[in-house]
Amino acid sequence: MVVFQPLYTADEMRAVEQGHDVEAMMERAGRAVADTVLHRYPDARRIAAVCGKGANGGDGRIALRVLSEAGRHTSEELDRDVDVVIDALFGTGFRGEPRPEAAVQIGRINEAGSPIVAVDLPSGIDASTGEIAGAAVRADVTVTMHGAKVGLAIAPGRFHAGDVVVADIGLEPSETEHRLVTEEILRLVPRKEEPVTKYSAGAVLAVGGSPGMTGAICLTAKAAFRADAGYVAVAVPKESLPVVETQLLEAVKAPLDRVEELAERASALAVGPGLGRGDEERALVRRLLTELQLPAVVDADALFELEPGDWLAPRVLTPHAGELGRLLGEESKWVDAHRLEAVRRAADRFKCVVLLKGADTLVAAPGKGVLVSAAGRPSLATAGTGDVLTGILAAFLAKGVDARLAAAAAAFAHGRAAELAPYHVGLVASDVIDALPRALS
């Protein structure tokens, strides 16, 4: 069972390559690029490569040789009549901002109007972080050697990579600090088996749902049930109870002043969806996180002005870029540009698991590598899907799954459910909930 796949940094790739025949590796790499061009673009006759001075450029020149032997017209001169452009300018060793002359070449590659096949990773992308400091190639296909790089899985580099093809160049797999989550992680989530009760199957307490925001807590509760929790209780302000009563059939409903009583039967807490950001709500969050010995998902309004604390049980923070920026004192644009650094900083600051939402959902824990979940579709960018994720994660925590693994599994299940939903245009959060049983089967 392969739960994680390696994501290599530049240093990790150098270590794997150490002691191997460089010429033999370059020959395999170049042939892999050529084979991909021939397979993906069989009608392409004129192919140009923009080659740098290093090994990446060598891979590109070998690809041109192989393509020429296959009867294609090849050149290292880029013009507007080419059918495919091979980007072999920079490799995994690139960091920072391209020099002006290189930036011009990257611009010409992007403006050629032809499909772009990148060698190892698009030029201008930091292989170890996915960061982009200046100009960067936008590839249609990336042929990466030996294994996927961190910069191909994490935004913004992820959005420049196109389809990623992993080429075997004769190296042995190696352990990496950061890893990609596979569907096998869902096997780590316990299923209901005899003997079982509704409480032993996972009991979730969800707290939130201020007037006008009851939909959020209802989505969380429904998602927890569909993620196979056996029992869900919801604590909301008294004014919200009539609405929640009509929306939730299976959950226990109670006013906020009974939250400690409800917590006695729970095995995990979800706090924040639709809670509100007033002084009383912030005080409630602090009290629950400080006093309750339940693993907890901290989301949405519960993240507002949150400070690190001496918490008695695991906590998983689930911010989007804007919320994480506020927690770190940074702009959301900075978080978007430095996602790996941002999520690791947050995990270290709060001394807990942090899940940074996005197309590449990142899960960080103090002193450990980052887990990346790439499941999902752009259709998840709709109101309420974050509340659904909170419910899934709370259910997994309630089943006793380790907080870091629960976060990674919840992110994958959430994305897989979106993929399986009947609608991709016009998807709403409830569609994701309805697809969860299939995603978990």
Image (spheres, grey):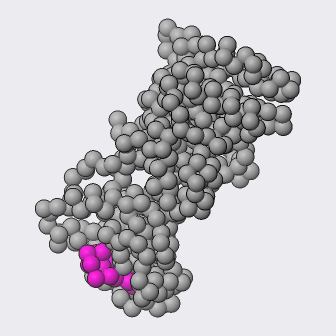
Residue 352 sits above or below residue 107 on the image: above
Q: Position of residue 68 (x, y in %)?
A: 31, 83
Q: Position of residue 284 (x, y in %)?
A: 68, 28
For the question of whether residue 222 can be seen, the reply is: no
Residue 266 sits above or below residue 164 on the image: above
Q: Is residue 18 left or right of residue 190?
A: left
Q: Position of residue 264 (x, y in %)?
A: 61, 13
Query: Is 49 inside the magenta-drawn segment?
Result: yes
Segment tinted magenta in the rendering = 47-63
| Quarter of the view holding residue 329 | bottom right
Residue displayed at 56% across by 62% down: 334
Residue 121 sits above or below residue 213 on the image: below
Residue displayed at 31% across by 69% down: 93
Q: Quadrant of the N terminus?
A: top left
| Quarter of the view holding residue 438 | top right
Q: Considering depth in this image, is 5 or 103 the residue closer to the camera?
A: 103
Residue displayed at 49% across by 10% down: 194
Query: Is 54 inside the magenta-drawn segment?
Result: yes
